[in-house]
Amino acid sequence: MNPYLEQEDAWHDFHERFLPHLAETSAGQVGTHYIVKIDEHVYIHEPPDDGHAFLGRADVFVATGQPLTETQTVAPAAIDAPEQITLPAVDVERLSYLEIRDRRDRRVVTVIELLSPANKYSGSDREQYLNKRGEILASRTHLVEIDLLRGGPRMPFGKALPECAYYVLVSRTENRREADIWRIQLRDSLPTIPIPLREPDPDVRIDLQALLHRVYDAARYVNYIYEGAPYPALSADDADWAEKVVSGQP
């Protein structure tokens, strides 16, 4: 995994590029009985008191100042209100996820989530995600959860997850409450993972490392993500390793 992708001005873009590539790769393997769809979570919240805004997303709502055309009519003058109040500013964050549905009955067979900071850090956004996660785990839907973020607390598990930088969870309906886990360290190559479907159909196989390279090259991250240090900060040993990888040193 590339730790430089976790910084604010890269992660949301990476997240939203990664899911369509994953959808395309999955759709090429599922056959005609399934539909792969991209859907999205919507998180609405007020910016914090310190005025800090997430830098990786453009404004969601943008008003244009184009002049009226001849075919447009001018609205009548507004009626003045006796007084005005200030409404709180809101930030709207949309995060994609994947659904694999059975084409015959449209039932959701598998949900694939790539976690983002909104899912991981304490607050209403995390609670919203955890509620949905709980609903999936209580249903007959497979869950694939991919965490490629070093920052933020882990999702809850029955017992503490052994130390790792990243992980992939595959929870199959037929094995609940057990689940398969791939623990990944910073310097490891990302694994090839299974995406379960309805029995007896075979799993989809996703090479996460190859997918990462496709997204990295298409987005041309090389042009800007190495201008600063990775965040969260790396240990001295890992920082030295990362610098050597970026510079092409052995």
Image: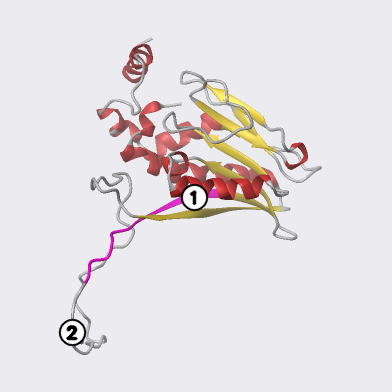
Is 61 placed above or below 170 here? below
Q: How many neighbours does mark 2 have within 10 angstroms: few (below 14), some (14-19), or many (20 or more)? A: few
Q: Quadrant of the C terminus?
A: top left
* Residue at far top of view: 250
Q: Residue at x 60, y 26 (%)?
A: 182
Q: Under tag 2, what secondary structure?
A: loop
For residue 88: magenta? yes
| Horizontal relation, residue 83 to residue 193: left or right | left
Task: State the image coordinates of residue 214 (x, y, percent, origin top left).
Answer: 47, 35
Chain part drawn in magenta: 85-97
Is 128 placed above or below 66 here? above
**Of the image marks 1 and 2, the number of the one nearer the N terminus:** 2
Question: Which residue position is annotated with label 2?
Answer: 80
Task: State the image coordinates of residue 177 (x, y, percent, origin top left).
Answer: 72, 36
Looking at this view, is 68 or 198 the one in front?
Answer: 198
Question: Which residue position is annotated with label 1?
Answer: 96
Q: Residue at x 51, y 32 (%)?
A: 154
Task: State the image coordinates of residue 162 (x, y, percent, origin top left).
Answer: 57, 21
